[in-house]
Image (cartoon, rainbow, N blue to C red):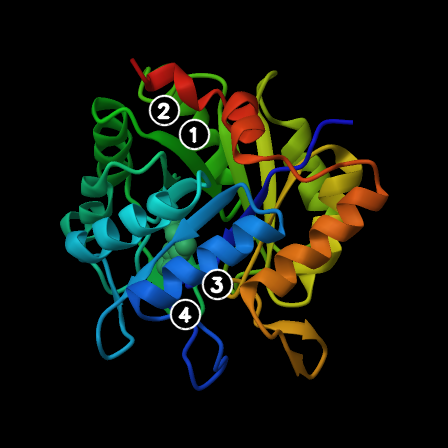
Amino acid sequence: MQPVIITAAIVGAEVTKAQQPNLPITPQEIIQSAVECHEAGAAIIHIHVRDAEGNATQDARLFREVVEGIRARCDVITQVSTGGAVWMNAEERLQSIECEPDMATLTTGTVNFGAGVFINDRQLVETFAQRLRENGIVPEIEIFDMGMLDEAMRLRSMGLITDPLQFDFVMGVAGGIGADPSHLLHMVRSLPAGSTWSVAGMGRHQLTLGVVALALGGHVRVGFEDNIYYRKGQLARSNAELVARIARIAHEMERPAATPAQAREILQLHRYKA
Ligand code: KMH
Ligand code: ZN
């Protein structure tokens, strides 16, 4: 079986320190958490940043500080969020790619997001895809609902994204597709040949859908952005604790955690590099 690429989504835009006291907020805390996750088996760090008050921001300088700080300490793949938070406009959201990350997220449609709306109209999505392409940044296509897959196929036919495509199925967001393994199977079966995929299950589904992904040959995302608990009623001590658990289970299932170098090969990240 192929090694599993573990992505650690260590900050997010919505979780607060009040909910999870071990949430990394400052650049130094985020860098430290990224390094610990790398040591625990993560090959990709999905990055959001926070301002001095702990609020989500897409401040380019903060992203640069975090990405450069991570790169100074390990070779883990840096993947910045272009999603930001639901209250941000497109221009604000795109600032994150200025730090020349390895990858960035690309959500291909609008979805209800709890009480908010995560707006990704066609013009925004096409602009984001174009900007990633121009800057040699490999997109991870975030799928919050089934129709977003069709929109991704439209971008592919327009030449705005090219194979092999990497998808992340975000499942269990209030307003998006439910965290049902049968939905996951249906989406996986709809992918173009040669695509790679991971699953990000919300809350308790992080673990269960992660295990389903391991069995199906997919990759897995864990971390505080999607889930703050180790088990019901018990907060996780760190992002790395969640990474280490899925790495242990993966090892038992003959899916060793991919190194960043292996993940770069699997995702063909080198295709954009000179
Ligand atoms: N915070 C969500 C509204 C991404 O990182 O690209 C969007 C999000 C997706 O987190
Ligand atoms: Zn995110």
Task: Looking at the image, tell me whether mark 1 or mark 4 is earlier in sequence order.
Answer: 4
Element under disc 1: helix
Circles 1, 3 touching at the beta carbon (< 8 Å): no
Q: Secondary structure at mark 4?
A: loop
Looking at the image, which residue is at 28% across and 46% down?
68
Amino acid type of the residue tagged 2 in the rendering: Leu
Q: Where's residue 234, x and y in %?
A: 68, 81
Q: Which residue in the structure is indicated by mark 3?
A: 225
Read off the residue under disc 1: 152
Mark 4 vs mark 2, foreground winner is: 4
Residue 156 at what x, y percent from top left? 40, 19
Q: Which residue is mark 2?
A: 155
As helix, strand or loop, the secondary structure at mark 3 comes to loop
Q: Residues within 10 Å of mark 3 (few under 14, many from 20)?
A: many
Nearest to the eye among marks 1 and 3: give it.
3
Q: Ligand 2 closer than 8 Å to the CB at disc 3? A: yes
Alpha-carbon span between mark 4 and mark 2: 34 Å
- Measured in 3D between alpha carbons, the distance from the residue under mark 1 to the one under mark 2, in whole angstroms, is 5 Å
Q: CA distance from mark 3 to mark 2?
A: 27 Å
The residue under the point 80% across, 39% down is 215
Q: Residues within 10 Å of mark 1 (few under 14, many from 20)?
A: many
Q: Amino acid at mark 4?
A: Pro
- View quadrant of ligand 2: bottom left
Residue that badge 4 annotates:
24
Q: Quadrant of the N terminus?
A: top right
Question: Would residue 120 be found to the left or right of residue 148 on screen?
Answer: left
Whether residue 57 sits left or right of residue 115 in the image: it is: left
Q: Earlier in the sequence, mark 1 or mark 3?
A: 1
Identify the amino acid type marked 3.
Answer: Glu
Q: Position of residue 195 (x, y in %)?
A: 57, 23
Callout 2: CB less than 8 Å from ligand 1: no
Q: Quadrant of residue 121?
A: top left
